[in-house]
Amino acid sequence: MWESRRLEYPNFGVLVSSLCTKGELNMTKLSPFLGAFVLSVIVAAAAQTTIPMGTIIPVELNTTIDAKKSKPGKAITATVAQDVPLYNGSTIKAGTKVLGELLSVTPAANSRPAAIALRFNKIVVSGKTALIATNLRALASPLQVQSAQSPTQFDNRWIRPWSQTTILIGGDVPGGGDVAYREAGTVERAGRTVGKSVFAGRWGVLSQVVRCPGEAALEGNGHPQALWVFSHDACGVFGYDVTLAHADRPNPEGNIVLASTKGDIKLRSGSALLLRVIGSIGQPSQKEE
């Protein structure tokens, strides 16, 4: 009987979890065998929605943040830029929304540099909002993003997108970092293959990252990560007169602090960020309207 019911509901784990949440399924009234089975389904469903620690999520910023105009509490949204394969077997799809907020703003004044604090702490999965904590591995301006998506060939008007070669953001070589060969499906640095070029909702790359300077060992470094327009060793800020404060000591609550090196801070919509998950609560917290 239970096998036939399970076939009727492809998302059986979601169904059972929903019934338990609504109080329509009382675990104490089930037989020990059936109770254990239902509990295992709930645990498996929760595991599938939890984002593993150390996962890098490449996002495109949808909100402009201006230290002169933006106020604390301002909502921030970003969009996942390419499919993110998780090493628990699931995938965060390109186009998924990541939500956050502006925590504090300090405009530049006299000799005082501008600073902002923000965080991305929610991700919308299947229409529901799950809680996460993230830090920032890399940030790049829209101009840097455009450059990393442009082919290196002289006359790019006639180059098909799947045949293009692009130079990714970051790295320790003049003019850019890793080179993505879309047609060959490889990402290389100085003749050495460091990843692969993929079409995952949009063009992106999968590479095994190296540890940023001063960064503690993190889970996920041994697995290919979705990096979109970034090189495998891209760390810090590109295209902005901004530094990432306390990059070697990420805030456990996911607060990201950026300090200006010249004038005010204005992070433009279309900027690219590599967010790294440092905490995840798999169960969705609320319905996203």
Image (cartoon, rainbow, N blue to C red):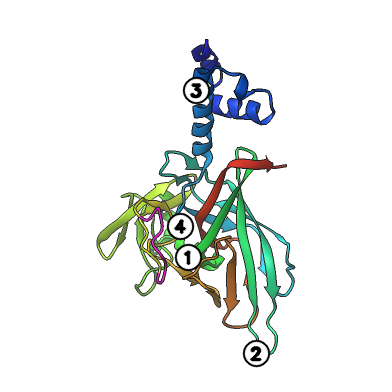
Where is the C terminus found, in terms of image quarters? top right
Pick whichever of labels 4 and 2 is earlier in the sequence: 2
Check disc 2 and give the amino acid type: Ser
Q: Which structural element holds mark 3?
A: helix
Answer whether residue 268 is visible to the viewer in this image. Answer: no
Q: Is residue 176 magenta?
A: no
Label 2, label 3: how many angstroms apart (C-alpha)?
Answer: 64 Å
Q: Which residue is mark 2?
A: 111
Check disc 4 and give the amino acid type: Arg
Residue 131 in the image: x percent, y percent?
60, 49
Pick whichever of labels 4 and 3 is earlier in the sequence: 3
Q: Which residue is mark 4?
A: 157
Pick whichever of labels 2 and 3 is earlier in the sequence: 3
Answer whether residue 74 is visible to the viewer in this image. Answer: yes
Foreground residue among 156 and 62: 62
* Magenta stretch secondary structure, dominant: loop
Label 1, label 4: how many angstroms apart (C-alpha)?
Answer: 15 Å
State yes or no: discs 2 and 1 in contact (Cβ < 8 Å).
no
State yes or no: discs 1 and 4 in contact (Cβ < 8 Å).
no
Label 4, label 3: how many angstroms apart (C-alpha)?
Answer: 58 Å
Q: Nearer the viewer, mark 1 or mark 3?
A: 3
Q: Which residue is mark 3?
A: 37
- Left or right, 212 with reference to 239: left
Residue 277 in the image: x percent, y percent?
50, 54
Residues drawn in magenta: 213-221
Check disc 3 and give the amino acid type: Phe
- Left or right, 44 with reference to 67: left
Q: Nearer the viewer, mark 1 or mark 4?
A: 1
Q: Which residue is mark 1?
A: 147
Residue 190 in the image: x percent, y percent?
27, 66
